[in-house]
Image (cartoon, rainbow, N blue to C red):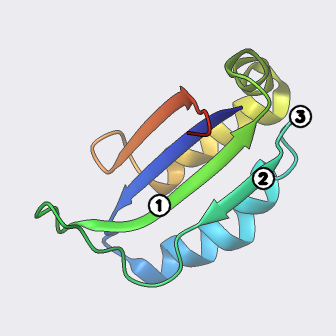
Amino acid sequence: MAKMTVIYKTPKDISSFEKHYYGVHIPLAKKLPGLIKYEVSNGAVRSTTGHSDVYLVANLYFDSLEAMMESFKSDIGQQCAADRRILANDDEVQIYVYDVKNV
């Protein structure tokens, strides 16, 4: 299984961010080919290592990294990438993709 973790810093306009994220971005991303699960943090994101500017964390799951990469090459994937730039520029977000295993 593969996972994408997206970490958003606190937006300048929280109300506008939330309206767009929940009203536009999530419905679009849920159309990604091969998406198994989409989850977001609920409530405050607390750090045990001193990071203080995290507003929201999202996790998207796919069968494999290959399936994820193919999904983001699709038309919907390209639309998601473009829409993410509306939500947050590259200084306001961190995105990680990786395989996961149960231990």
**Which residue corresponds to the image point at 75% horizontal and 32% vertical from the top-left?**
77
> What residue would you read off at disc 1?
57
Which of discs 2 and 3 lies nearer the camera? The answer is 2
**Which residue corresponds to the image point at 30% horizontal and 71% vertical from the top-left?**
12
Does any portion of residue 20 appear in the rendered image? Answer: yes
Image quadrant in which you'd find residue 75: top right
Mark 2 nearby-residue class (10 Å; few <14, some 14–19, many ≥20) = few
Quick check: 83 above or below 75? Answer: below
Q: In which quarter of the image is the N terminus?
A: top right
22 to the left or right of 84 = right
Quick check: 57 above or below 91? Answer: below
User: Label 1 to label 2, Cα distance in Å?
Assistant: 14 Å
Q: Position of residue 34 (x, y in %)?
A: 87, 34
> What residue would you read off at disc 2?
37
14 to the left or right of 85 = left
Does any portion of residue 25 appear in the rendered image? Answer: no
Mark 3 nearby-residue class (10 Å; few <14, some 14–19, many ≥20) = some
Q: Where is residue 49 in the image (x, y as percent from the top left)?
A: 14, 60
Give the residue type that dot 3 points to.
Pro
**Which residue corresponds to the image point at 61% horizontal and 33% vertical from the top-left?**
101
Give the residue type that dot 1 points to.
Val
Image quadrant in which you'd find residue 67: top right
User: Label 3 to label 1, Cα distance in Å?
Assistant: 21 Å
Give the residue type that dot 2 points to.
Lys
User: Label 2 to label 3, Cα distance in Å?
Assistant: 11 Å
Q: Secondary structure under badge 3?
A: loop
Q: Where is residue 72 in the image (x, y as percent from the top left)?
A: 72, 26
Q: Secondary structure under badge 1?
A: strand
Q: Where is residue 46 in the image (x, y as percent from the top left)?
A: 28, 74
> What residue would you read off at disc 3?
33
Q: Which mark is residue 100?
A: none
